[in-house]
Amino acid sequence: MNQREVAWRVFAEEYNSSILEHTGEGEKPVSYIITPLGAKINRMHITGVVTDIEDVGEQGKSRYRARITDPTGTYYISAGEYQPSAAMALSKMSPPAFAAVVGKSRAYTPEEGVKYLSIRPERIREVDAEARDYWILETAKSTLERIEAVEEGLKMAEPTVSALVKLGYPENLADGVVRAIEFYKDIDLRRFRTTVAEALKTLVPEA
């Protein structure tokens, strides 16, 4: 039985900076987007403000495209006949609204060197500001853990999954970090620390 993929909490800034795709092994290989901080995303959990929803369906088939923003950027989501409950939720939503989304990462490469990332939602529900704030806090924590894991990996002459696991990082993150370091080379950790700080600032604007 296939284990259900973890739903990563990743800020838009980190997700939209990702260009590395990886396909797993086995009979039904799973495809992943690997972020510069080593999140190995097949499924993700985001919460933010739905800023606009558009019905782009044709021939009587509904398909909705929406933009959801967090404090660091914008995610693009689309739901159609194969995601009926998500499409139904979007059809009833009036932007601006807070929403939580769990969905699959999607990459589209129209030409060499150009990659568009989106999320194919499994479920969407309207939430309140408190749920959005909690998501920001939890996502900040997991982003900082990834930053630390990359930092540890960069200190190693040759980073390996087992060495990172020994330091206490989960195996799926350790694997993603090793791949990220190999692919992205000079990862600007300061930029992602700033992203986290800016996101947290939205929770305490007077700070």
Image (tube, rainbow, N blue to C red):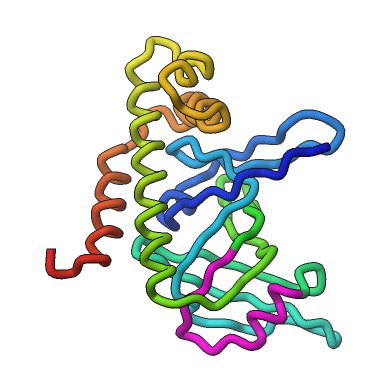
Residue at the image position 64 percent from the left and 46 percent from the top: 42
Q: Position of residue 166 (x, y in %)?
A: 46, 16
State which region is magenta.
85-101
Q: Locate the C terminus and report the quarter of the image it occupies.
A: bottom left
On the picture, is 50 further left or further right than 138? right
Q: Position of residue 173 (x, y in %)?
A: 51, 32
Whether residue 86 appears in magenta in the rendering, the answer is yes
* Farthest left residue in view: 207
Q: Quadrant of residue 117?
A: bottom right
Residue at the image position 53 percent from the left and 68 percent from the top: 100
On the picture, is 8 further left or further right than 12? right
Residue at the image position 45 percent from the left and 32 percent from the top: 184
Q: Position of residue 31 (x, y in %)?
A: 70, 41
Q: Is residue 167 above or below residue 137?
A: above
* Farthest top residue in view: 157
* Nearer to the camera, 198 or 100: 100
Residue at the image position 51 percent from the left and 61 percent from the top: 46
On the picture, is 29 further left or further right than 156? right
Q: Position of residue 94 (x, y in %)?
A: 54, 89
Whether residue 17 appears in magenta in the rendering, the answer is no
Q: Quadrant of residue 201?
A: bottom left
Q: Is residue 170 above or below residue 77?
A: above
